[in-house]
Image: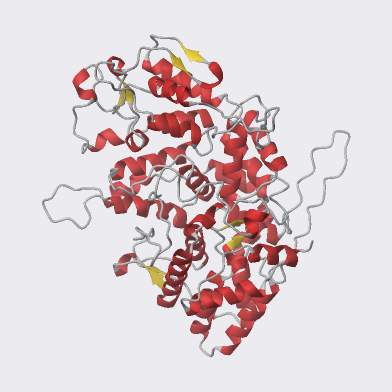
Amino acid sequence: MDDATDTMELEQALPAASTASAALAAAALLAACGGGGSGGADGGSAAPATPAAADPTPATPPAPQPSRRDAARFLSQASFGATGPAQVDALVAQGFDGWLTVQFAKPAALHMDYLNSQRGRDQKAGEKPQLSEEMSYEAVWQQWLTGEDQLRARVSWALLQIFVISNIAPDIRPAAMSSYMDMLNRNAFGNWRTLLQDVALHPAMGYYLNLLESEKENAAKGTHPNENFAREVLQLFSIGLIQLNADGTSKLDAAGKTQPTYDEAVVKGFAKAFSGWSYGALDNSKAAQFHDHDDNVEALWVVPMKAWSAYHSPADKLLLDGKTLAAGQTPEKDMADALDTIFQHPNVPPFFARQLIQRLVASNPSPAYVGRVAAVFANDGTGTRGNLKAVVRAVLMDAEARGDSPAINVAKQREPVIRLANMLRGLGARSASGQNRIQYLDSSDDALGQSPLLAPSVFNFYSPGYRPAGPIAAQGWVAPEFQISGETAVAGSLNFFADLIGSGGYGWPEAHRLNLDLASLAALDATALVDRLDLLFFNLGMGASTRSRLTTLVAAIDSKTESVKAALIVTALSPDHVIQR
């Protein structure tokens, strides 16, 4: 099957567009026109490096240089999008391995630093400087748009969609959200076991899933430890509901049925093991402070929780696969043992590998791809389990992820916030202040239907197993991002991008408005303009029909600036842009 046929089939799996607006009608027209394959002047492969001359003890020859097409694809998977031809060409020269090595060494952006730089803004003189939730949202975009740690930012965004917290209520303090983001950034290339513990003991997670101040059972009162975190850490964060083979496929019993990973008794056992934790900034020698404190004290939200033995369940605890914790252990020992039990469960490598692949590369990785990444999780080659640096490298460097012509299953919808970040970076968006005011994008009516730190629930914006009815489901595939791609959301996001491009920027007040650099595109002739759009927004994989329509459109509009805007609006709604290949 050739590339054009592959992409045509994928486009046919897209939901039918509404005809409620002219923009949506154009989207439907483009979807019907198909497209696929790379045919731009910016495409093509660089010559491979010449192997070193043979000697009695030859070194491993250098890896061949990647093609420009694969370099562009790599940047769409490992960052928030290419900024221009120079970045793609630099990656071709550097090679993927060199780029990864440099990115792994980049220091993490600190969201709390951004918050502290904004503390007290827009307040009256004499008022105590405060933080606002909007600052936490801006900090995310600041890292995405301007941070040099692009790989870390992209991985931490993936982690946030697995280890979910959300301020949708809204009632999580700004310092809690931003220190949680700093924790994910810090752990993005560390060890999964450390990440799991830091997630469990972060007060933002403790508050969100009720682990904070969960106390031991009391028969007289008829109470028991809160089970919310215990349930979600198993179902959503680590092992899932059914037993898996090492390649992520379901492990079946003799009757051909799936097998559960745990039952309600296990949830209760973990809830007991996790009981007795409150804010780490309090004095745990004072029993009253476990419940009696002021949640508005910022210091409570930025340090890990600590244990109060008097509130911890002294009972024995049933965990996974029949493992039992002995009665009378300390809360710290029970926490460590419970997390170790999760970490060692055979489901963790394929469960995590599949989700990380889905967030970065493809919605439907083959079992072999999942199995290879899971094997690296289980053992990075040095006997270490859970080495996330090795896992990230395995996800991005796998043979299924790389190449100029990926298989039809190696595709995913670019989620709305990724498309916006890609557009802003590709168009050189800058503000006079160097800051942004991107805050609430969760409305489906007039925004993107998705906004960082505002997932509708602990189940994230979409399920990793979501199957829209139609060709995708018939193929046995999943398409997670399509869960937030209903008719209203598609119309809203399309109008959002039309407004962004038409107005030439986003945000207010003027000092913080991100202004798009359209002049550099307007200076290009029609062919060069379409080639540049291909590189920035199509990974050098623009379909032939899209290229033809863009070329015709640009030639039909006299004003260079208006022709650029029109081309960008068509780009934003083109299936071969929306689907990352």
Closest to the observer: 105 or 417? 417
Which quadrant would the N terminus be assigned to in this image?
bottom right
Residue in view at x 47 percent, y 45 percent: 161
Hey, which quadrant is residue 387 in on the image? top right
Please tell me whether residue 564 is drawn above or below residue 225 in the rendered image: below
Q: Is residue 548 visible?
A: yes
Please tell me whether residue 183 is drawn above or below residue 421 in the rendered image: above
Q: Is residue 411 visible?
A: no
Single out the residue that lies furthest toward the front.
Answer: 255
Horizontally, is 115 left or right of 468 in the view?
left
**Residue 334 percent location from the top left of the image:** 42, 17
**How many numbered circles are shown?**
0
Residue in view at x 65 percent, y 66 percent: 12
**Residue 565 percent location from the top left of the image:** 50, 78
Residue in view at x 55 percent, y 50 percent: 466
User: Which scheme is used to colour this image of the protein?
Assistant: secondary structure
Horizontally, is 78 left or right of 427 in the view?
right
Which quadrant would the C terminus be assigned to in this image?
bottom right
**Residue 21 percent location from the top left of the image:** 46, 77
Closest to the observer: 217 or 154? 217
Residue in view at x 44 percent, y 31 percent: 231
Closest to the observer: 50 or 557? 557
Hey, which quadrant is residue 336 in on the image? top left
Closest to the observer: 206 or 119? 206
**Residue 262 percent location from the top left of the image:** 52, 26
